[in-house]
């Protein structure tokens, strides 16, 4: 008997694959990138890991004695680099030119190499360091001074636009002269403090006032008629301006009075520093 469409059995059902929803992995926010601060007051005492900084400065020292003025122009190359939380720094000062009154006639130029500075410091945190410094002056001259210091350095943020950093150092200084016969040496125990007050005038310009005080205690040095021995106190005061003209470039200008103005010693500084930070 023929079947009608109504009597026909329906075709077997076909299985349809249905995707089972799965939980998506939890989104992890990206690690924020913290750039090196442009503001001088916000900068840490040591560079970030693998950071480098270097530059040159023109140093002009002027002495005054009565109506006479003497000027010495030196060029300083300075650089520092960080590996982890440890930083090393080096500086080299070279003689460029000197100016004397005509009445002095021809004055021989001093040695080309004026001084060498080396330092290594460890950052306890962004605002605290401990380290060692070595300063050698007159390495190739007849009068040589070597000074080593152990230094503790701390920076305090007074406000978002003001900071003060202070350092205290304890060490030893040895000076020697080949001008005397026989040659003589002088040694001192040195205590030094340095203080800088920084004010951020604009996001890219900062003003800095600074002072340094040194106490040298004679360590049994011999006395010579041409050299002053015994304990002594020296101090420097100055003011400087740092302008960040690009995220990685600073232009620096400063004026300092050295050793309390003895012989009218004044230091004028202008320079540029550049850095590469991660």
Image: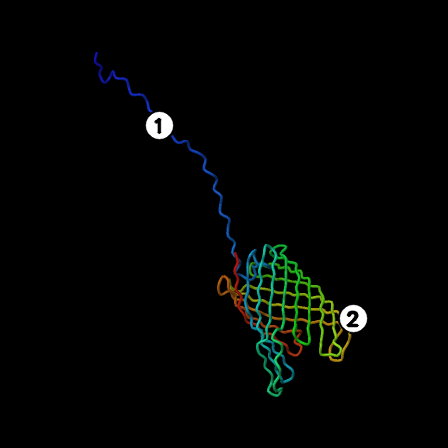
Residue 221 higher or lower than 159, as above or below: below
Residue beneath label 1, please?
16
Secondary structure beneath label 1: loop
36 lies left or right of 136: left
Q: Are marks 1 and 2 in contact (CB under 8 Å)?
A: no
The picture quadrant where one finds residue 92 is bottom right
Where in the figure is residue 6, as x and y percent of width and height?
24, 17
Judging depth in this view, the residue of 79 and 23 nearest the camera is 79
How has the structure been colored for display?
rainbow
157 lies left or right of 223: left
In which quadrant will I find the N terminus? top left
Secondary structure beneath label 2: loop
Residue 29 higher or lower than 127, as above or below: above
Furthest residue in direction left, as rendered: 2
The picture quadrant where one finds residue 180 is bottom right
Judging depth in this view, the residue of 141 and 189 nearest the camera is 141
**Whole-Å distance between the Cαs marked 1 and 2?**
101 Å
Q: Earlier in the sequence, mark 1 or mark 2?
A: 1
Residue beneath label 2, please?
220
Where in the figure is residue 69, as x and y percent of width and height?
61, 82
Q: For the point 66% across and 64% down, which residue is it?
A: 133
The picture quadrant where one finds residue 187 is bottom right
6 lies left or right of 251: left
57 lies left or right of 2: right
Where in the figure is residue 9, as x and y percent of width and height?
28, 17
């Amino acid at each position: 008997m023929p079947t009608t469409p109504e009597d026909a059995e329906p075709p077997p059902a076909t299985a349809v694959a249905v995707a089972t929803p799965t939980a998506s992995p939890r989104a992890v926010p990206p690690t924020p990138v913290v750039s090196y601060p442009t503001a001088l007051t916000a900068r840490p005492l040591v560079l970030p890991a693998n950071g480098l900084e270097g530059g040159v400065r023109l140093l002009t020292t002027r002495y005054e004695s009565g109506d006479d003025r003497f000027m010495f122009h030196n060029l300083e190359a300075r650089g520092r680099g960080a590996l982890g939380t440890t930083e090393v720094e080096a500086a080299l000062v070279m003689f460029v030119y000197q100016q004397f009154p005509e009445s002095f006639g021809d004055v021989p130029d001093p040695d080309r190499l004026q001084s060498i500075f080396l330092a290594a410091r460890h950052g306890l945190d962004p605002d605290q360091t401990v380290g060692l410094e070595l300063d050698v002056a007159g390495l190739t001259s007849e009068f040589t001074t070597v000074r080593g210091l152990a230094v503790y350095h701390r920076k305090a943020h007074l406000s978002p636009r003001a900071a003060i950093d202070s350092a205290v150092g304890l060490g030893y200084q040895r000076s020697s002269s080949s001008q005397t016969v026989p040659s003589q040496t002088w040694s001192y125990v040195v205590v030094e403090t340095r203080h800088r007050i920084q004010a951020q005038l604009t996001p890219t310009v900062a003003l800095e006032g600074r002072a340094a005080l040194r106490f040298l205690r004679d360590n049994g040095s011999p006395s010579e008629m041409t050299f002053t021995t015994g304990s002594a106190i020296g101090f420097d005061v100055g003011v400087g301006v740092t302008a960040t003209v690009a995220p990685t470039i600073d232009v620096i200008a400063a004026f300092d009075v050295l050793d309390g103005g003895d012989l009218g010693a004044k230091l004028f500084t202008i320079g540029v520093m550049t850095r590469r930070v991660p």
